[in-house]
Amino acid sequence: MPEQTLEDLLRALAPQVLGVVVRRFGEFDAAEDAVQETLLTAALRWPEDGLPDNPRGWLIQTATRRLIDQFRSDQARRRRELLAVQEPPAADVTDRDDTLILLFLCCHPALTPASAIALTLRAVGGLTTTEIAHAFLVPEATMAQRISRAKARIKTSSAPFRMPDADERTERLYSVLHVLYLVFNEGYTSSTGGRLHRTELSGEAIRLARLLRAMLPGDGEVAGLLALMLLTDARRPARTDADGGLVPLAEQNRGLWDRRLIAEGVALITETIAHDAAGEYQLQAAIAAVHDIALRVEDTDWAQIRALYNLLERMTDNPMVSLNRAIAAAMIDGPEAGLELLESVEPRLAGHYRLDAVRAHFYEQAGKIELAIKHYLAAAARTTNTPEQQYLTTRAARLRGRLTGD
């Protein structure tokens, strides 16, 4: 079995297996440990023994046995052992998908929003602690402690494993939406590794967003997030060349964009933004729609995009939004206007590769080639995604060749 296929399969099955085990035993922390050990066993054994007939069932059975063994070895948990000595019923193994319940459980009100999102990214999204720390722009050790504390709070809260009622859903919805957004982003542009995309993550985020939309059809932000994912994912076929290299938005073959996803996303955001006060995901979806309906890059309505980013910046105060607003300003008023706006963004994004990459692009447009090379190389040194790193290094090399005449 190809290594990447096995990794993708285990990642997709992990939240489903964890959901079943948590539902049966009510011990989130212990269940996650058992599932992680089971996934490691599968990763080592399946390449040699072959894929089981029912991989999901094998993982559930093996994780369950591990947890039962753990309970049997702990005299203080004898009562739980008596409840857990039977094998999982066949329905648990084959039918029920508890991922959405697990998603809401991880976003428990006993947790801070940041801790809830971090825990969900690990349990549902399957991200590593390193990847989650990158998404939050914090050190890995800090994120590891945050996740550990979150699991401990879930354990002490004795939260039942069930879909929350309407009031509880409202209380947790912001965290749920944000975690789906981060999982999608990690899938669309991986923070580490040799692939630009991790479609198993972006695909799972879209699947869960569709489930959430079916549960809450009248919520504008749920619709906005789903529309944003669809409109963004529609461009994926054109984001890489035949060798897997990064192709920037301005250079993409728009004939490769998925027009079916664009039509669905545009219809969804058009419908929802007409009936609701626009939230942050609706505004982002509207920006994505403006990009996607432009058949040529020169047809892009940058004035509308800048106006939407102005609204979004006032709403969120997110430095990445400010960075994108600077890009829109540069497209309208020239690179010097973009460079000026970057000055206010720099304190909040110091050391982030995207700040250097955008600054390099502005300097290139302004004809300041040496400065552009410097910042392309700085951005390449800071990103841990190989296709992005190669793209940035190549841009610097081409500019240096222009200077030297090579």
Image (tube, rainbow, N blue to C red):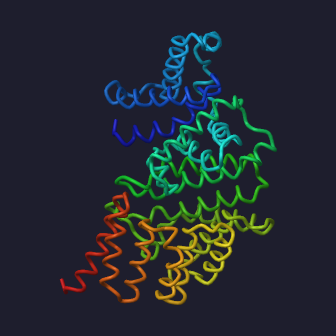
Q: Nearer the viewer, residue 124 or 157?
A: 157
Q: Is residue 119 above or below residue 387?
A: above
The image quarter in which residue 51 lies? top left
Residue 72 position in % (x across, y down): 54, 11
**Looking at the rendering, in which quadrant would you find the N terminus?**
top left
Asked if residue 403 lies left or right of residue 321, the reply is: left
Q: Is residue 299 above or below residue 15?
A: below
Q: Is residue 44 above or below residue 143?
A: above
Q: Nearer the viewer, residue 81 or 114?
A: 114
Q: Number of numbered discs present?
A: 0
Residue drawn at x 31%, y 27% is: 48
Q: Nearer the viewer, residue 399 or 267?
A: 399
Residue 368 position in % (x across, y down): 35, 87
**Looking at the rendering, in which quadrant would you find the C terminus?**
bottom left
Residue 198 position in % (x across, y down): 45, 51
Residue drawn at x 34%, y 66% is: 380
Q: Nearer the viewer, residue 40 or 2?
A: 40
Residue drawn at x 39%, y 78% is: 360
Residue drawn at x 61%, y 80% is: 306
Q: Is residue 273 above or below residue 10?
A: below
Residue 176 position in % (x across, y down): 66, 48
